[in-house]
Amino acid sequence: MSATLAAGRIRLLPEGTVNRIAAGEVIERPAAACRELVENALDAGAQRVAVVIGGGGIERIEVADDGFGMTADELALAVLRHATSKLADDQLVRISTLGFRGEALPSIGAAARLSITSRTAAADHAVTISVEGGQISSVAPAPGGHGTRVVVRDLFYATPARRKFLKTPRAEADAVEVAIRRLALAAPAVAFRFESDGRVAFDLPSQSRAARAAALLGAEAAGALLEVDATRGAMHLTGFAVAPTVTRATAAAQTLIVNGRPVADPLLRTAVRVAYRDVIAMGRHAVVAVFLDLPPEDVDVNVHPAKAEVRFRETDAVRGLVIGGLQRALSAGAGPAAPFVMEPRHAQYQSRPPLRLGPGHAAAAAGFSEMRLPLADGPSARILPAPDRFHGPFTAAAPGQEFPLGAPLAQVLDTYIIAVAADGSLVLVDQHAAHERLTHEALRTQYLEGGVRAQPLLLPAVVDMPEADCARLAERGPELACLGLELEQFGPGAILVRAMPATLGAPEPGPLLRDLAEEFADQDEAITLGARLDAAIARMACHGSIRAGRRLAGPEMDALLRQMEATPRAATCSHGRPTFLKLSRAEIERMFGRR
């Protein structure tokens, strides 16, 4: 046989190649390496963990802990594949530790330059070992305190094919921070410190679960935490749901923890989405930090080498527990009134309790003069004056042209417009959702025609934001300028806004910039630039639209309905919710039992 192996011949791969293949499964990016190292520290009983990265974790990762440490013999074994101290038996049934496969350290050593220094409480000095591209050194004495310090340099230098697929250092650093935040949420009793390129992102002491959640979920979410506590059989769900008034553009702020292990499980994410479905807008994502504890034998964590996915023995029970537990938390303080469902096919879109008129309702029938009609609870309804009610009985200036959405009659709860169409159908319009779509389409049209028209601010606004968010927006400056948003970085933690899209009026820039930063933080490569810009337009449209609770005059309501009739996609808002509901005579009569 020639020196060159014939194609298709079976052979055993060299150990070094096997290790590099395994490294590609276990350590797909710096965030995975950091997660594995921190999990090792937590399994080792650490009370404090410090993580320092440089160059997004590609250049350097350092994880130090004050755990049990390792002896010289244990350290020599730790860098060999499938050597672990975490399995009590070989059945893989009751896995109670974060790590168990014995692959992380040898996988890192096969793809990078790895050094480990460790010392037990009983030892009089530390010991160290290094692995570079799979080549293992001998164990040697070294200085060092109790615990373990792991340093990883030049990640993927030995596997250049993997390295070239990494994202920018900033994007990799963001992913590392998300992973460490989730681990810190999972172990609030452990002090955590995270530093990236000299910037300390957080330095948290040992604290309660509520304090840790408040510290890591952000100030806005910290003020809206709702406690979750639900049990079904041997399963227990605890943690925090954030009120639906606080949402995010992506699901990055959802931390799902199973038996102390942060996971990215599709079943749990779907359960969260279902629990919040009726209380947040479509396209928005809830903020949660929930802990599911169940017997180890009822969950399989040996699904993938990365250990991010799990399989449950009783999927329906888990799904029901999560949905029910979150929905009970969200219903706290909501009041006794049940939502009024207008029609079964519209059940997913629930309105507030029905209008109940006070003693003055008879005056409305007499003259339809503008008046305030007191409700039993909450805001009141307004009936339009006679001249505003019927201008051009449901027809435009051109004879015979009907208005599909009819003429406005009243505004209810300062949010919903009531109109009657030419065929007698009752039309209910959500003024914010409708105007959001109109604004979205106007911005989109301007962008496609060459750029959204900008309105310079008389006084530039300064918005304080996390440094990473500021950097993301600054990097997108040329694209945002095409959307009429002119900004520049103003120091490490602030953005200076010089102009806003003219179509938006004068919205507060802070909430808009935070939404845009989250939109651009999404690492999904399947999302095209065009889709990201359209999503950014949708965010701007939401912030620049008529808000719920604003009173509208008759001409304003009429103009809104007429613009809806002439605008594409006006049946839904930018988030996919309906902008109006139309009830025919037959549907109304069925509701009242007349048919």
Image (cartoon, grey):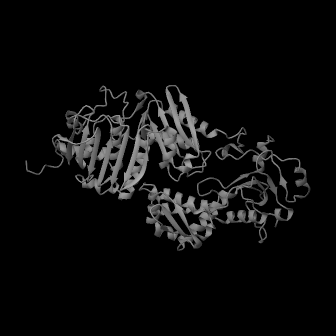
User: Where does the image place residue 539, in percent across and percent down from the top left?
Assistant: 56, 59
Residue drawn at (78%, 60%) of the image: 408
Q: Nearer the viewer, residue 6 or 147?
A: 147
User: Where does the image place residue 590, in percent across and percent down from the top left?
Assistant: 77, 43
Q: Nearer the viewer, residue 416 or 197?
A: 197
Q: Nearer the viewer, residue 302 or 113?
A: 113
Q: Nearer the viewer, residue 216 or 561?
A: 216
Outermost residue, front direction?
124
Say whether residue 29 is left or right of residue 208: left
Residue drawn at (79%, 55%) of the image: 424
Q: Is 520 placed above or below 145 here?
A: below
Q: Quadrant of residue 551?
A: bottom right
> Is residue 29 something that shows in the picture?
no
> Is residue 142 something that shows in the picture?
yes
User: Where does the image place residue 309, in percent across and percent down from the top left?
Assistant: 40, 40
Say whether residue 460 is left or right of residue 353: left
Q: Quadrant of residue 22?
A: top left
Say whether residue 495 is left or right of residue 299: right
User: Where does the image place residue 378, in percent across and percent down from the top left?
Assistant: 76, 48
Outermost residue, right direction?
366
The C terminus sits in image quarter: top right
Q: Quadrant of residue 391?
A: bottom right
Q: Is 593 placed above or below 497 here?
A: above
| Count of residue discs | 0
Say whether residue 242 is left or right of residue 407: left
Q: Is 476 placed above or below 279 here?
A: below
